[in-house]
Amino acid sequence: MKLKDIGEFGFIKRIERGCLIRDGKVIRGIGDDCSVFKTSGEMAILLTTDMLVEKIHFLLSAISPYELGRKSLAVNLSDIAAMGGTPREAVISIAIPDKIDLAVLDGVYDGMKSMAKEFEVNLLGGDTTSSPEHVVINIALVGEALEDEILYRSGAGEGELIFLTGPVGSSAAGLDLILKGREMEGWEDLIEAHHNPYPHVKAGRIIAGIKAANSLIDVSDGVAADLGHICAESRLGAILEERMIPTTEKFRDYCRKFHEDSNHLSLHVGEDYVLLGTVFPGSANDLRAALESEGCEFHQIGHMVAEPGLKLRTRENSLESMATSGWDHFK
Amino acid sequence: MKLKDIGEFGFIKRIERGCLIRDGKVIRGIGDDCSVFKTSGEMAILLTTDMLVEKIHFLLSAISPYELGRKSLAVNLSDIAAMGGTPREAVISIAIPDKIDLAVLDGVYDGMKSMAKEFEVNLLGGDTTSSPEHVVINIALVGEALEDEILYRSGAGEGELIFLTGPVGSSAAGLDLILKGREMEGWEDLIEAHHNPYPHVKAGRIIAGIKAANSLIDVSDGVAADLGHICAESRLGAILEERMIPTTEKFRDYCRKFHEDSNHLSLHVGEDYVLLGTVFPGSANDLRAALESEGCEFHQIGHMVAEPGLKLRTRENSLESMATSGWDHFK
């Protein structure tokens, strides 16, 4: 069955079910010119938006519709996590070529709804339109946070420790394997890391709540690029410790087996969607304890320095300059 | 100059200027994982999003980049207007093929900024990405309104008068002329109506403020389709008066000259972005006076009836059934 068989409004009716997770503060969901909701009066509002374009961000031949739906919401959830906020209400725009089967769209929306349910986010409507050639999904997500808990890229200070809330590189290795057409068997964890990333919203809330960290970002463009944003916005530099970069055993196996550059994959390619932040050295243990007691991770990976630029202290104890470049859509 | 010459981050720096119109309640604009702002505590939040896709919604050969930028924000402003709200904060996602020149993008953003300035809307960031083939623009817009002033599609009552806040059909005639490749000279007003619609935010605020109207929608899909939404949501029918449908002289000239069906263009094609609503008969004069005193328009065009379905009373005084179908992206 194709979209033209049920039409735009038939499609909207079809996807409506399961979109409202919390209805407490929602005044109007899908079905009017706007969605309408209230926030807690004292909270600041967080707003983020991300666009996923077929052939640029995903291949329909590689990712399942369900995973695509999950991922398109996950990347936005991760942005809210990176401010220390709580995600609340989402609107979804989707452009769909005629050739796409309705079952694909059902899968995409099922994936979005599963992710929405896990994070108690309402899907409050959006825009559906046709597309001449490629699927495009855009989600805008509203979250909230107490103003004095929000963590910015600009808040890092000299001497602060740099931490990650999870391993990096697995998503990059998964993508590498897909792009190089390698046999997937045995590497499912890496593919999963790339296709079904799990946003660190809980970690973000913990980090913001205990007020020990001073800057936070999510690893979407790569550790080097995203730490580069913190450095640029905080007008500082950073030194990373190669031996402290957390990676999974599967990731290390993959790099060994195929002679891939593990530093490149773990530091210069993105989409891990773990959080990267800085914390006062004296508060690092408290932050670690708070995260670990809730099943989250804390990996110290370096520290902030006054001198601009990003450096990597290698396992051989030499200090190498790192490019802060990660993924740039136009370069 | 192409985007790849300055890169994603260079592009963001380039467009940043002029994006913040009101900075009172904005805590963070462009440049972090989310934008952060506060709303007035007692207000309900309105959220809308619209996606414009090249070759579906616009042709780069027909519309200027500046008008495209204005229109992409205008369609969202119109959704806020249709709830009686005040537009506040926008985030913009744009997917751009390599072939597009930077001057085109500068034009698009200049257009968005001009519209943002007129309506005191902040452009607080978004997402920029590449695209394999077509330009895609998605805007998500946050507005606010007092909860008891918001006007829904579902609020119409039997016997209420149906009104428009401006003429319809000009945008459809402009599109018709473009698609049929007719000489544009002399028909600039129609082209302008299609390429540079002006959202009726002021009219929406007046209508909501005096609490005389009971339902409201903007004419994006066409009068018949959008009135069809009000009928469906309010579980009523409607009778429109052909002789009362407001059109411009240019529109009537165009239909006469090219033997185009004026009812089709004025009622069954959309993108006029005027407001369509219903009002208690006894309050219609007050609403008209309130709108006209502020330079807005009020055109009574019919009334709501209990019997479902949409009918048109023709100039010859016969009652004809109307299809409620307007633009459906998939049919």
Image: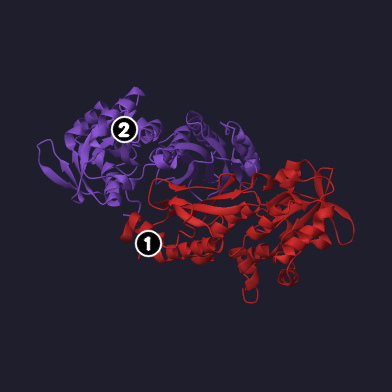
Chain colours: A red, B purple
Q: Position of residue A174 (x, y in %)?
A: 64, 66
Q: Nearer the viewer, residue B73 or A187?
A: B73
The quarter of the displayed image where residue B261 is located: top left
Q: Nearer the viewer, residue B144 or B32?
A: B144
Q: Nearer the viewer, residue A275 or A221?
A: A275
Q: Nearer the viewer, residue A106 or A13?
A: A13
* Direction from residue B32 to residue B218 in the image, left or right: left
Chain letter of the residue beneath label 2 in the structure image: B
* Direction from residue B162 to residue B19 in the image, left or right: right
Structural crowding at the residue carrying mark 2, measured as other residues with C-alpha within 10 Å and reported as few (<14), some (14–19) or many (≥20):
many
* Direction from residue B203 to residue B306 in the image, left or right: left
Chain letter of the residue beneath label 1 in the structure image: A
Residue at point 67%, 47% (across, down): A150
Q: Which mark is residue A227?
A: none
Q: Which residue is mark 1?
A: A14
Residue at point 84%, 53% (across, down): A281
Q: Is residue B192 visible?
A: yes
Q: Which amino acid type is shown beneath numbered disc 2?
A: Thr
Residue at point 26%, 29% (across, down): B285
Q: Is residue A138 visible?
A: no
Q: Which residue is mark 2?
A: B165
